[in-house]
Amino acid sequence: MAARSGPPARFKVAALLVVLGMITYVDRACMGTLKPNIAHDLGLSDVQISWVFSIFSWSYALFGIPGGVMADRFGTRTVLTLIVVGWSLCTILTGQAVGFWNLMVVRFIFGAAEAGAWPSVARTFAQWLPKSERARAQGTFFAGSHFAAGVTAYLVADLLRMVSWREVFFAFGIVGLAWAIVWAIWFRNLPSEHPSVDAAECALIGEPIAGLPKVEWLTLLRMFTRSKVWILCGMYFPLSTFFYFCITWLPTYLKEQLGLRPQLATFFAALPLVLCAFADVLGGWATDQAVTRRGLRDGYRVVGAGAFAVSAVTLIAAPLTSNGIVAGLLISVGTGASMFTLPAAWGASTKIGGPQAATVSAAMNTAGQIGSAICPLLVGYALKWFHSWTLSIEIMAGFFVIGALCWLKLEVE
């Protein structure tokens, strides 16, 4: 191992992953912002758009665990490279869609390609960072992702002044392909394999978690008999469900239901996501502090259950107010509170998973993606059958009550 020059290699790895998180959410959030353009050009109804939003998450949920297994088996250098190349090509192809079914197929493949990304990130953090830095790194990763999602509405609005919505997707896809090239050339699966890691940094990082020498499918199936895994999944379900509302239907809700003028609607579409960025970092710090003072189990419980209680209360209240600005603020606070739990959630998943860190993380993320898949359909059919926005939002508030109970039952040792 050569002597190190410049920032520690683990910081460079973390920085690359933060950029990756930003790319993933720009690619996702731009769909919600571009919804009017896409629906108009392709002649799609609200229910059809709901299915376009949903099919990505159903596919993501279906392929999340296989993606995590592959990361545990083959390492994240190869797996993340293939994942990012795949979804970047699908981003470009989204801009080439000519109709409903064509768009559905592309978004299904998109979800399958991206499914293993976040479990791979979780495993990379576990391999490359000492335990004392992981929660803060996860918090920074999510902060970058959510900040990027928050500014996407403004970025897309600026781009649409110069290019079509189809060319917006092409530009975002090229950015992803560039990231994949850098990752494939520079990254290594283990710190000890990287020429920039010196002996001191390698010792600080500690012993890497083991990989899977082969895929034991029976062992993986037994993983789902563990109550810890099911509680972990139940805890994560509401978090992804409402966040997906924010990046799909929220811009429409702000304009059509709350009657906010375009500039104000754009602001309140971005605000929940920007608050999430701050909540991610603060949540990572708070999780580390809570774990230091109370231990792993109680530290995670305090952070998770407390934040979910705030989310439930604010989302119950939001549809009940007639003031659009107050409703927008309540939704923003509730979304930010939910994301305060992300570092604890992903820290718990890697702790519970051990050698199967990416696989257990993928199972948790899959549960969240099922919620993400249900969310747009819940909204779309509530509008079609009951002409109600309130119904779907109150149901999602109820999910947070259930999630808080799951946090109180979570066992992390």
Image (cartoon, helix red, strand yellow):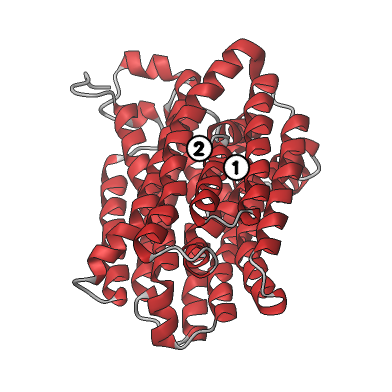
Outermost residue toward the front in this view: 322
Whichever of callouts 2 and 1 sits on the residue coming sooner in the sequence is: 2
The answer to whether residue 55 shows anywhere in this view is: yes
Q: Residue at x 44, y 31 (%)?
A: 281
Q: Give how far across and how far down residue 15 sits, in percent.
A: 32, 36
Marks 2 and 1, how far apart at CA: 9 Å
User: Which percent across, then down, holds residue 128?
Assistant: 42, 29
Q: Residue at x 41, y 34 (%)?
A: 140
How many numbered callouts? 2
Residue at label 2?
A: 123
Residue 88 image-quadrant placement: bottom left
* In-front residue for pair 164/310: 310
Residue at horizontal 44 percent and vertical 56 percent from the top: 269
Binning the other alpha carbons within 10 Å of mark 2 as few (below 14), some (14 to 19) or many (20 upward) gives many
Where the C terminus falls, by quadrant? top right
Q: Please name whichever residue, 321 or 88, is drawn nearer the observer in this view of the structure.
A: 321
374 above or below 275? below
Estimate the x, y position of residue 188 in percent, counting from the top left.
35, 37
Residue 232 image point, x, y percent? 70, 39
Residue depth check, mark 2 versus mark 1: number of the one nearer the observer: 1
Q: Is residue 86 visible?
A: no
The residue at 49%/62% (across/down) is 254
Q: Would you place residue 280 above or below residue 67 in this image?
A: above
Is residue 273 rendered to the left or right of residue 235? left
Label 1 secondary element? helix
Q: Callout 1, which amino acid? A: Ser
Disc 2 and disc 1 in contact, CB within 8 angstroms: yes
Q: Quadrant of the N terminus?
A: top left
Amino acid on which disc 2 is placed: Arg
Q: Secondary structure at mark 2?
A: helix
Q: Which residue is mark 1?
A: 361
